[in-house]
Amino acid sequence: MVHYDARYHPYASKRNTVYSRNGMVATSQPLAAQAGLDMLKKGGNAVDAAIATAAALTVVEPTSNGIGGDAFALVWIKDEIYGLNASGGAPAAISIDKVKEKGHEEMPTFGMTPVTVPGAPSAWAALSERFGKLDFAELMEPAIRYATEGYPVTPVLGHNWEKAVNKFKEIFTEKEFNHWFETFAPDGRAPKIGEMWKSEGHAKTLKEIGETKAESFYRGNIADQIDAFFQKNGGFLSKEDLAAYEPTWVDPIKVNYRGYDVWEIPPNGQGLIALMALNMLKGFEFTEKDCVDTYHKQMEAMKLAFTDGLQHITEDKEMKVLVDDLLSEQYAEERRSLIGEEAILPEAGEPKSSGTVYLSTADGEGNMVSFIQSNYMGFGSGIVVPGTGIAMQNRGHTFSLNEKDVNVLKPGKQTYHTIIPGFLSKGDQPVGPFGVMGGFMQPQGHAQVVMNMIDFQLNPQAALDAPRWQWIKDKQIKVDPSFPEHLAQALQRKGHHIIREVDHGDFGRGQIICRDPETGVLAGGTEMRTDGSIAAW
């Protein structure tokens, strides 16, 4: 277990680390956390709790995820770790030429075209089938109840909802977007903070997913509804795409960082970037967290890792380099040698904003789950299937239309994926799940919180409360409102172009659960940057 002082809070935290023994759920919305805890109290395990929480999040945090999104999971159960990739591919009918015929020189952000096959419902069903203890339909019940009876909108949720509605009123002018407004802005506006919101469409769909173990979504009534709407509006996604889809169990990848194994999902996810950065950083000695040298080296390593990630990461079978080569000690040393006293200018793409939810669960038997799901950019594509509450993701936006790019659009191909769950272990013992949601912030957040815990012995809550930074492009670094001014100025003198943000929204929202291997006591931290909550038993 990572050693830390639970009473040591060097940052302006509103929370203490939460402790429990029988079970814990940490996520970005209190009602969703409670949904998972209910399953634990009914005799379910950490997997059951994760599924119930994930389903509830599609209702109680629709600004960041939905039934029409993707998901990934790392599961520690019976002393082994398992990985699940539930990201869908591009429709079989799509092609570069067809996208360009619609007038696009690059993949559009919204509408029918960037929609890929949703994987989230398949993830819930696959996890339940392999590891769950409770009936699958029972896991959907809290989400169905919140959708049917309604729930009060929380502060960060309400803020993000209002921003989205105001933006979409300006850009969603075609009729295909009408159902988004009917579902999420039925009164012509976003629900206000504290106001009740419900969705009969969500409830109906989740009930059908529960009763059929997600079969209806891919090979039944729901698939038919999705197909009919896309065909009517000139979309590419079809019921044949849905019927052909299955999630994939994968072998997680890892690096050893100062005696701890840091686990991520392999490509097409960007967890590889976090591991490459940590592999470089472990070659340095860090004695102080809040100093110029520490931040400078972290930023330089992340820039180098992102340069490689954006160049090489795509669907695994399409990659032209081996993951093992990118994670080799030799390559880490080669890249580490480029880190000097001044900020360098790497060649890389430009990270973009997004919306994602992350959750961690643990039960009293030592089982733990790191789970993440997303519609990519907030509400996703703006496409909602009529009467279903299904907001479709816009994950296909990350495809390139340049034939020379490794992540070029192809029918059936999985694109470069931003959402990544993380997990820590030491020897044969789990330390616990961790994650920081938020588009291209995610591997940057992973590296920062891992170092906070391991290098600087911060407890889970303090590790999340710490100031964050995000590399954007070139030498541009955003720092959050709590980032010390004197350090920002010193980094500027080293050649970094520092941009101070007045809002925490761009810096990810994380959760951590750690387990003491001797006592089984769980310690959890949640995010001050969102409506984060820990439900403990």
Image (tube, rainbow, N blue to C red):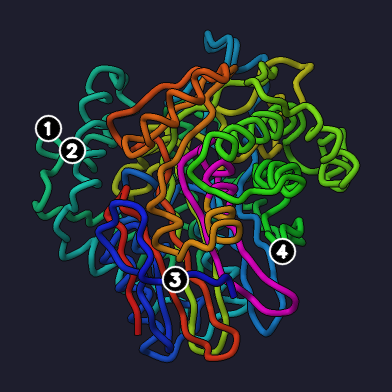
Q: Check disc 2 and report its element: helix, strand or loop.
A: loop
248, above or below 132, in the image = above
Q: Check disc 3 and report its element: helix, strand or loop.
A: loop
Label ID, residue 45: none
Q: Are marks 3 and 1 in contact (CB under 8 Å)?
A: no
272, above or below 219, in the image = above
Magenta span of residues: 419-448
The verdict on residue 171 being magenta is no
505, above or below 109, in the image = below
Q: Residue at x 34, y 79 (%)?
A: 536
Residue type at numbered disc 1: Gly
Q: Quadrant of residue 339?
A: top right
In front: label 3 or label 1: 3
The verdict on residue 446 being magenta is yes
How much space separates mark 1 and mark 2, taking CA atoms?
5 Å
Task: Find disc 1 in the rendering and name its residue.
Answer: 188
Q: Nearer the viewer, residue 29 or 449?
A: 449
Task: Find disc 3 in the rendering and name its residue.
Answer: 5
In the displayed structure, does residue 511 sit left or right of residue 77?
Answer: left
Task: Give the mark nearest the N terminus, 4 or 2.
Answer: 2
In front: label 4 or label 3: 3
Residue type at numbered disc 4: Asp
Task: Give the mark nearest the N terminus, 4 or 3.
Answer: 3
Task: Find disc 4 in the rendering and name its residue.
Answer: 261
In front: label 1 or label 4: 4
Task: Find disc 2 in the rendering and name its residue.
Answer: 185
Task: Give the mark nearest the N terminus, 3 or 1.
Answer: 3
In the displayed structure, does residue 319 sit left or right of residue 531?
Answer: right
Q: Quadrant of residue 475?
A: top right
Task: Give the mark nearest the N terminus, 2 or 3.
Answer: 3
The quarter of the picture where the N terminus appears is bottom right
